């Protein structure tokens, strides 16, 4: 067992002003290059993780501005803000940047890269140089995609799903599409390498005592995400290579033009299959949805226990729920293709509906974690709760879409747009920026302003509902997605205006975040090692952590070693054993009343509890 | 026994009574919905102008009610947790991590809900997708950016591009078989009032039945993004009496081909807001 050291400066979290010299002390004791050269040549997972997050957040703001352009265009039926061509580029690049360059890289390349080695007590990732390569592939891929705006013919404009044969050179010639493909190949390899790296790190570099079932849920989710990436991304890369061949080498993998007459009679020459692209793309694309969701579930699952002062309720159930989601997610891709008429509806419908079960389990885990806790509503907690409400609504409408007859009339309408924005915004924005507020003190040793954080949250939360609820109505009234114009006589305009107002509320919220980041940079407030009384291992070390993360580790006897170390008196409360008296100085005792109800209540749950290794 | 229970005798009983009252209220709402029967609200969807659309609509109502119930239960659980368990002292709360019974309940109940929903889905899906008999056949071809409706039996062809929405005429009370194809990229044949859409896939002939139950003119539009003027790919479906349909097909010449260029189409849409026939 690792040496047990005297308690770190933890708990309390009294923030005090910090002199500017003290903030530089974080990575002390290093040799080698400094400044820009250090950043360019670093293999430190913490620096790479932060680089990933900064790049991803910059891209998030760019894609957000594109979304505002879309919303402005739709305030009038015959929108004149941009041309048709520009509008098609706007929504293609908005979707592509958000899906490929923000949501995944922010969580997986960024936060996971930073937090997972700390959380399992590792000095770095398993392959530090591969990690650096991942970042530079991602940065290069991102620039490649954005360059599309500067080539003749404009950026890619075939939608983020690039359905063939629209995405072939016959229908979308030009460099924009090629840059889009290249960008995805580059970022795809970046994701694959990070996936390999994280899986290897989690399997091989855990600290003594950190067994698999003592890994925090955050790390578990990143492990499962890494495996999903290894399943999904190679398929996308292969599909993209074939698309490129169709565009430039004259292959007919996805296209039938010249193979069939207009009436559908087959011609003698070999024919491709447009629906093959859809199958390959969604075989990547649906696991991708969970690649984007699971890391954010992990963030929420770290935030709820911290601000409830409780363990994760149903920890093992949650691990298996995560695995079930991952397994099911590889068998539901064709629910994006119900209206193609060429997929087996009942199979994909049933598997899609079944995903609601492990997702529901997670919901009850989160509620059970808060149940009978002592909830403190700091900014990260507000964002995590915002995620719960957003994801609940998105999840319920997702169950509706899993039913083919309902999907038939909502597919490709604003109903679907509202649904997937509620789940993706719910995860990547609410849980994601909750995670940013939560781990920011660990990364930079300084706090973000809580009051501004709350402004950020409430503007975003209100804006979220104002933006997306009208879109459900629009979808049910028959407004298709990806239209730059709509008929004026159908009463759609007022709903669209409401949606646009919501989008600007969200934008205002994210302006507040910029102010907050600026203030924390100009006028830092010291965070201390563990300002939140957080539970996982990364809060045991200094903020920011030293170059190799730890000089000493606490004993690791559960998934929350820092909590065990800081609250030795709380161990006895673990399984609700009533014969153990409350620790001294607790006043009225745990929770006061109502112990006879609800999840987490009572004494019946003795089974499944983990005995502590002594 | 949990120590906290004994500290406040009676508190649990009072709360249990409050909870049972809440359940009673919920039950009353559910019963009210059931009693309302066919007068259920539309929940925003179209009632369906075809038998297939009506089947889908009924399924939608069922899913929506199930959705409301699940949403409400989870919503109030979250709300209760964040209101009731706000921090009130510095005490360390109970660290209970597992409760087997509760965990089994919240695993099994969703499975049962999902299987029930799947059962209804399966039945409705087979009704909506059934292609058994037919009285009228229409070959629909989607292309960038317009539609062609061809009636092979009557040698009638209706063609429309962005400047002019084509109209597909069909008889009420008769089963119309649609053979849907694409001439170029993937398009989506979507009639909101029919609660139905289907892709026009290049290289594939999709077929489905439409059995209209009311006359009227319904708007249709391409839903699958198909390039530059995807936004302008409208059509109309006009459901008329069988006799009016017969009159119409015999009055048609071979084809109706409107003129106009893409640029002027864009201009027209931009100024008038919608194309009209």
Image (tube, grey):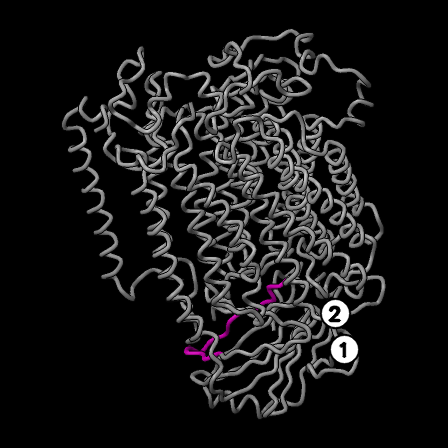
Q: Chain of mark 2?
A: A
Q: Is residue B228 left or right of residue A579?
A: right
* Quadrant of residue A445 within the rendered picture: top right
Q: Nearer the viewer, residue A117 or A63?
A: A117
Tag 2's secondary structure?
Answer: loop
Work out which quarter of the rendered image holds the C terminus of chain B and state it.
bottom right
Q: Which residue is mark 2?
A: A255
Q: Nearer the viewer, residue A193 or A299?
A: A193
Residue at 41 percent of width and 76 percent of height: B51
* Quadrant of residue A588 within the rendered picture: top left
Residue at 65 percent of width and 38 percent of height: A200
| Magenta segment boundaries in residue numbering | B210-224
Work out which quarter of the rendered image holds the N terminus of chain B and state it.
top left
| Whether label 1 touches label 2, CB < 8 Å | yes
Residue A604 lies in the magenta-colored region: no
Q: Which residue is mark 1?
A: A259
- All told, the count of numbered labels is 2
Residue at 78 percent of width and 69 percent of height: A252
* Quadrant of residue B59 within the rendered picture: bottom left
What is the magenta segment's predominant secondary structure?
strand
Give residue B156's position: percent from left, percent from top.
63, 88
């Amino acid at each position: 067992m690792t040496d047990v050291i005297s308690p770190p400066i933890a708990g309390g979290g009294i923030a005090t002003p910090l002199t500017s010299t003290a903030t530089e002390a974080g990575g002390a004791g290093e040799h080698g290059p400094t400044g820009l050269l250090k950043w360019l040549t670093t293999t430190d997972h913490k620096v790479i993780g932060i680089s990933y997050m900064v790049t991803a957040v910059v891209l998030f703001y760019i894609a957000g501005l594109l979304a505002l352009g879309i919303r402005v265009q739709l305030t009038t039926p015959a929108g004149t803000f941009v041309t048709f061509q520009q509008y098609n580029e706007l929504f293609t690049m908005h979707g592509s940047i958000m899906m490929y360059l923000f949501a995944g890289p922010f969580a997986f390349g960024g936060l996971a890269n930073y937090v997972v080695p700390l959380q399992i007590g590792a000095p770095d990732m398993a392959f530090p140089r591969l990690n650096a390569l991942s970042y530079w592939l991602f940065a290069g891929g991102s620039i490649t995609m954005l360059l599309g705006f500067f080539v003749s013919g404009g950026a890619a404009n075939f939608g983020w799903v690039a359905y063939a044969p629209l995405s072939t050179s016959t229908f979308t010639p030009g460099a924009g599409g090629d840059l889009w493909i290249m960008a995805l190949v580059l970022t795809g390899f970046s994701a694959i390498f990070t996936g390999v790296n994280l899986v290897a790190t989690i399997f091989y570099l855990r600290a003594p005592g950190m067994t698999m079932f003592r890994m925090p849920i955050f790390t578990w989710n990143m492990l499962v995400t890494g495996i999903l990436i290894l399943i999904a991304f190679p398929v996308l890369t292969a599909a993209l290579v074939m698309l490129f061949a169709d565009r430039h080498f004259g292959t007919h993998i996805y296209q039938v033009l010249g193979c069939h007459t207009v009436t559908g009679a087959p011609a003698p020459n070999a024919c491709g299959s447009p629906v093959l692209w859809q199958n390959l793309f969604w075989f990547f694309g649906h696991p991708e949805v969970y690649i984007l969701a699971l890391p954010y579930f992990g963030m929420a699952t770290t935030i709820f226990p911290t601000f409830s002062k409780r363990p994760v309720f149903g920890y093992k159930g949650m691990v298996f729920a995560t695995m079930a989601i991952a397994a099911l997610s590889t068998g539901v891709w064709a629910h994006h293709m119900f209206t193609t008429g060429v997929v087996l509806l009942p199979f994909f419908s049933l598997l899609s509906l079944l995903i609601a079960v492990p997702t529901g389990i997670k919901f009850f885990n989160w509620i059970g974690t808060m149940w009978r806790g002592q909830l403190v509503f700091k900014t990260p907690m507000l964002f995590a709760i915002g995620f719960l409400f957003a994801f609940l609504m998105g999840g319920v409408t997702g169950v509706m879409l899993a039913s083919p007859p309902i999907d038939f009339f909502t597919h490709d309408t604003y109903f679907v747009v509202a649904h997937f924005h509620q789940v993706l915004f719910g995860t990547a924005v609410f849980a994601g920026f909750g995670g940013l507020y939560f781990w920011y003190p660990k990364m930079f040793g300084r706090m973000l302003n809580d009051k501004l954080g709350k402004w950020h949250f409430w503007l975003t939360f209100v804006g979220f509902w104002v933006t997306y609820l009208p879109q459900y109505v629009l979808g049910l009234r028959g407004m298709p997605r990806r239209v730059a114009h709509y008929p004026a006589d159908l009463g759609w305009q007022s709903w669209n205006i409401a949606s646009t107002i919501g989008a600007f509320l969200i934008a205002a919220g994210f302006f507040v975040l910029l102010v907050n980041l600026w203030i924390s940079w100009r006028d830092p407030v010291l965070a201390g090692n563990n300002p939140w009384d957080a539970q996982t291992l990364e809060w045991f070390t200094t903020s920011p952590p030293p170059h190799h993360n730890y000089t000493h580790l606490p004993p690791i006897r559960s998934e929350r070693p820092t909590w065990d170390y800081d609250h030795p008196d709380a161990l006895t409360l673990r399984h609700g054993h009533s014969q153990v008296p409350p620790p001294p100085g607790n006043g009225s005792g745990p929770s006061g009343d109502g112990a006879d109800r609800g999840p987490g209540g009572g004494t019946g749950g003795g089974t499944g509890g983990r005995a502590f290794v002594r | 026994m949990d120590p906290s229970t004994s500290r406040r005798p009676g508190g649990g009983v009072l709360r249990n009574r409050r909870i049972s009252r809440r359940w009673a209220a919920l039950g009353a709402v559910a019963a009210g919905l059931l009693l309302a029967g066919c007068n259920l609200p539309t929940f925003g969807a179209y009632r369906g102008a075809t038998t297939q659309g009506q089947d889908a609509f009924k399924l939608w109502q069922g899913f929506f009610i199930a959705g409301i119930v699940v949403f409400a239960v989870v919503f109030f659980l979250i709300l209760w947790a964040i209101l009731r368990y706000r921090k009130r002292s510095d005490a360390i709360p109970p660290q209970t991590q597992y409760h087997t019974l509760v965990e089994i309940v919240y695993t099994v109940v969703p499975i049962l809900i999902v299987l029930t929903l799947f059962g209804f889905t399966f039945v409705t899906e087979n009704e909506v997708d059934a292609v058994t008999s037919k009285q009228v056949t229409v070959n629909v071809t989607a292309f960038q950016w317009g539609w062609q409706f061809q009636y092979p039996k009557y040698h009638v062809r209706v063609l429309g591009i962005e400047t002019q929405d084509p109209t597909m005429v069909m008889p009420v009370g008769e089963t119309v078989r649609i053979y849907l194809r694409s001439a170029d990229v993937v398009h989506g044949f979507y009639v909101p009032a029919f609660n139905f859409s289907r892709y026009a896939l290049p290289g594939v002939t999709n077929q489905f039945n439409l059995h209209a139950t009311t006359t009227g003119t319904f708007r249709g539009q391409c839903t699958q993004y198909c390039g530059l003027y995807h936004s302008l790919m409208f059509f109309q479906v006009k459901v008329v009496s069988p006799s009016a349909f017969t009159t119409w097909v015999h009055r048609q010449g071979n084809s109706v081909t409107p003129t106009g260029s893409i640029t002027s189409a864009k201009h027209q849409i931009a100024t008038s807001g919608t194309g009209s026939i």
